[in-house]
Image (tube, rainbow, N blue to C red):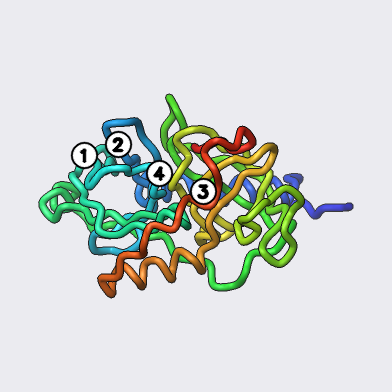
Amino acid sequence: MSTSTIAGTNLATFVLEDVLGLFGASVQRSVPLIITGRGHGSGIVWDPDDLVITNHHVVPGDGATVVLAGQRMAATVVGRDPRYDLAALQIDRAGIATLGEPLVPLKPRRAPPRAGQLAIAAGHPRDERDTLTIGVITATDHSPAPGAGERPWLVQTDVRLRPGHSGGPLLDSVGAVIGVNTLVRGSLSLAIPVDLVNAFVAAVRRGHHPPHLGDGASRDDDRVTWL
């Protein structure tokens, strides 16, 4: 396959570097570190007011500390859905005031993701902060991969996820949220698709708290790595 060049620079390389430079700032402004008594994970600023989305398994208690732009802010869990491994945190208003600027939400992707598309995971894996990891979508609910088990609706990628990535965004090439990173099963990295996240956020805003439906994947399954 041939590629074009700009002043001797490979076009694919030029575009990718431009995308990563743009995402680097987004990670620091829109992907908070979530700290609890049992460890840490990542999150997504979902609206400009106070809502952060992360994984249910990242925040087992009623609250957490959200770290964004170097500021530590208290947050309360205002909704969770164990079945889809999602939780919503509301940041304390006094904490937001310490930022000195509005929260910067990430935008959800409108079109369904497709196998073969670029995928970028943003988050805070163990011992690192503000990282970006690149891969491609290998399967979606339209074409589930073998071994997806009872969760074929998850977006499946070859992005290398590590502990601490949980709750962070999986992004497309323009920075829109494809899903929320949740676990690794064998060689697959899996994310909750953004349409389910949108439905969850709508339920939280209506004051609806889903019943405990189970995690959807056994924690005794040695193929699963909870991030």
- Kindly identify which numbered label has been placed on residue 6: none
Q: Report which residue position mark 1 lands on.
A: 72
Q: Residues within 10 Å of mark 4 (few under 14, many from 20)?
A: many
**Which sits earlier in the primary sequence, circle 2 or circle 1?**
2
Q: Please indicate whether residue 66 sits to the left or right of residue 74 in the image.
A: right
The residue lying toward the viewer, choosing from 214 and 129, is 214
Q: Report which residue position mark 3 lands on.
A: 181
Q: Please indicate whether residue 121 sits to the left or right of residue 71 in the image.
A: right
Going 45% across and 41% down the picture, which residue do you hit?
123
Mark 4 residue type: His
Determine contact: label 2, label 1, CB under 8 Å.
yes
Q: Report which residue position mark 4 lands on.
A: 57
- Looking at this view, name the residue that lies furthest to the right: 1
Frontmost of labels 4 and 2 is 4
Q: How far apart are marks 2 and 1 (CA)?
A: 9 Å
Q: Where is residue 86 in the image (x, y as percent from the top left)?
A: 41, 55
Residue 46 occupies quadrant: bottom left
Mark 1 residue type: Arg
Q: Report which residue position mark 2 lands on.
A: 35
**Which sits earlier in the primary sequence, circle 1 or circle 4?**
4
**Which sits earlier in the primary sequence, circle 4 or circle 2?**
2
